[in-house]
Structures are given as structure tokens and as C-alpha cells.
Amino acid sequence: MVDLTFQLTPAREITAWVRAVNPSSRRVLEKCGFQHRGSGLRDLPARGGQFPCDDFGLDRGTWRSLRRHGPPLAAPVRAGPAPVPAS
């Protein structure tokens, strides 16, 4: 999703947040290159109130750098329709 967002949109940054009690989700964001930007309370109506959350962000420049220096994170996006298999 990160690759598609930066490849197909003019977005300069992707932001995300996770509940502070969810270290697994935090690790997923960090492995994708997101950087911790702070912490605070977030309104979570489905949970019935405000809860401590960690905020993360990934900007386009950092993403480019990670793509240049690391293994591909996803298959490149092809332009046009998918080829039709021969019968």
C-alpha cells in the first residue's frame, strides 16, 4: 500500500497511529519505514473513549531512500491492462 500510494498519488507523506498497547502494529509500521513522531490521546468511539496512541509518519523522501538502498517492498506497478494469456 505504501508503494502504491507514493507511485500513484502526489502524497508527500503517509501518517498512521497505533494504540500504545499494540507493539505488534508498531513493529509493522517501523519495518515499513515509518518513524515515530510522538504520542497522545486519540478519540476511539468504537472503544468508548480516548486512548494513548503512538503517531508515525513516512515521507516520500525517506521512502525513496529506503527503496534505493533495500530490497523491493512490492512488485512495480505496470501501466496498461494485464496481458491476456495465450490459449
Image (tube, helix red, strand yellow):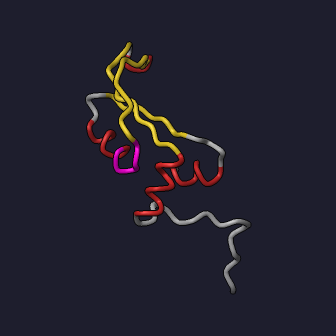
Position in image of residue 18 (x %, y %): 37, 32
Position in image of residue 29 (x %, y %): 38, 44
Question: Residue 50 lies in what quarter of the image?
Answer: top left
Position in image of residue 42 (x %, y %): 41, 19
| Left or right for 70, reference 64 | left
The residue nearer to you, when weighing 65 against 10, is 65
The residue nearer to you, when weighing 72 against 19, is 72
Taking the spot 38% from the left edge, 31% from the top edge, the residue there is: 37
Taking the spot 36% from the left edge, 20% from the top edge, the residue there is: 40
Q: Quadrant of the C terminus?
A: bottom right
Counting labels gives 0
Query: Which residue is most to the bottom?
Result: 87
Query: Which residue is most to the top?
Result: 49
The answer to whether residue 56 is magenta is: no
Position in image of residue 81 (x %, y %): 72, 67
Instruction: Judge whether 15 appears above or below 60 on screen.
Output: above
| Left or right for 41, reference 76 | left
The residue nearer to you, when weighing 40 against 65, is 65
Q: Please identify the dominant SS of the magenta region.
A: loop
Taking the spot 58% from the left edge, 41% from the top edge, the residue there is: 12
Instruction: Judge whether 81 appears above or below 2 on screen.
Output: below
- Residue bounds of the magenta highlight: 30-34
Taking the spot 45% from the left edge, 60% from the top edge, the residue there is: 73
Instruction: Judge whether 24 appears above or below 72 on screen.
Output: above
